[in-house]
Image (cartoon, rainbow, N blue to C red):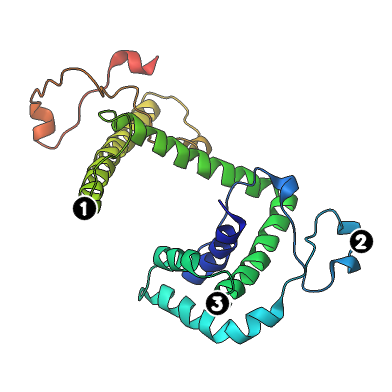
Amino acid sequence: MSNRLLDHLFAIFPTVGYRFAPRIRDLKEKKLYVPDDPKHYPALKSFLGDKPINTKIVRPQWDEWLRLATSIKQGTVTASLMLRKLASYPRQNGLALAMREIGRIERTLFLVEWLLDPALRRRVTAGLNKGEARNTLARAVCFNRLGQIRDRTFELQRHRASGLNLVVAAIMLWNTLYLERAVAALRAQGHQVDDALLKHVAPIHWNHVILTGDYNWRQNRRVEKGGFRPFRPQSWA
């Protein structure tokens, strides 16, 4: 991801009520930005960028930025569309430049907190690991074309991606329902299940799902009546 796009993401996220919290892998290459001359902070010399935040660019574009932020907040325009438009703008575009300066401010605040807060680093890493696990599940389900969507038209691509999302969501829903029932059954048998550990369990495993081979669609009267399948005895071992 380019630094330009990264700064635009940091600028846009607060406008829609979210916080952009990416995993910082190349931390030693990231720079902090201050509103005045970096030479005023000799102790932070190795952390600071060569140039300060250019507020002269932000001020004349502030009203335009507020209009854009309001449009995104009200749903008049999507953030993804604006990111694509900003990426296509010339580098000298005033709004794009102002958003980059705003993004640098947000990125600096996030990097400082990232350095000082180990709990934040753990939360971000845990959240991204779950997201990557969900993507791994989607690649496992999309096996027919080796995990690639090769349809030529956007409509067919969207149709295939929607079908993939539906199957992945069904697997995650199935896992969620039966994980909940498994925990309840364990507790009913006297086993101790710590609630603090359950938040680390994600319903995105698929070892029990047959993705290839022959599918035998056998009817189950209990399931047809709104019930659930029984647990396998060996699953408690």
Label 3 vs label 2, nearer the camera: 3
Q: Earlier in the sequence, mark 3 or mark 1?
A: 3
In three-dimensional space, the C-alpha distance between marks 2 and 1, rounded to whole angstroms, equals 56 Å
Q: Is residue 202 visible?
A: no
**What is the crowding at mark 2: few (fewer than 14 residues within 10 Å), some, or many (at least 20)?**
few
Residue type beneath disc 2:
Pro
Instruction: Name the element at disc 3.
Output: helix
In three-dimensional space, the C-alpha distance between marks 3 and 2, rounded to whole angstroms, equals 32 Å
> Residue 6's spot in the image, x, y percent?
58, 58
The quadrant of the rendering that contains the C terminus is top left
Residue that appears at 55% across and 64% down: 8
Is the residue under label 1 in contact with that under label 2 (CB below 8 Å)? Answer: no
**What is the crowding at mark 3: few (fewer than 14 residues within 10 Å), some, or many (at least 20)?**
many
**What is the crowding at mark 1: few (fewer than 14 residues within 10 Å), some, or many (at least 20)?**
few
Q: Which mark is residue 22?
A: none
> Residue 222's spot in the image, x, y percent?
11, 29
Is the residue under label 2 in contact with that under label 3 (CB below 8 Å)? Answer: no
Q: Earlier in the sequence, mark 3 or mark 2?
A: 2
Q: Is residue 194 visible?
A: yes
Residue type beneath disc 3:
Leu
Q: To which residue does mark 1 refer?
A: 155
Q: Which mark is residue 42?
A: 2
> Residue 218's spot in the image, x, y percent?
9, 22
Label 2 vs label 1, nearer the camera: 1
Note whether 236 is above or below 92 in the view shown: above
Q: To which residue does mark 3 refer?
A: 95
Residue that appears at 61% across and 75% down: 98
Residue type beneath disc 1:
Glu
> Residue 14's spot in the image, x, y percent?
54, 68
Question: In the rendered image, which quarter is residue 173 located in?
Answer: top left
- Give the total of numbered labels: 3
In three-dimensional space, the C-alpha distance between marks 3 and 1, rounded to whole angstroms, equals 32 Å
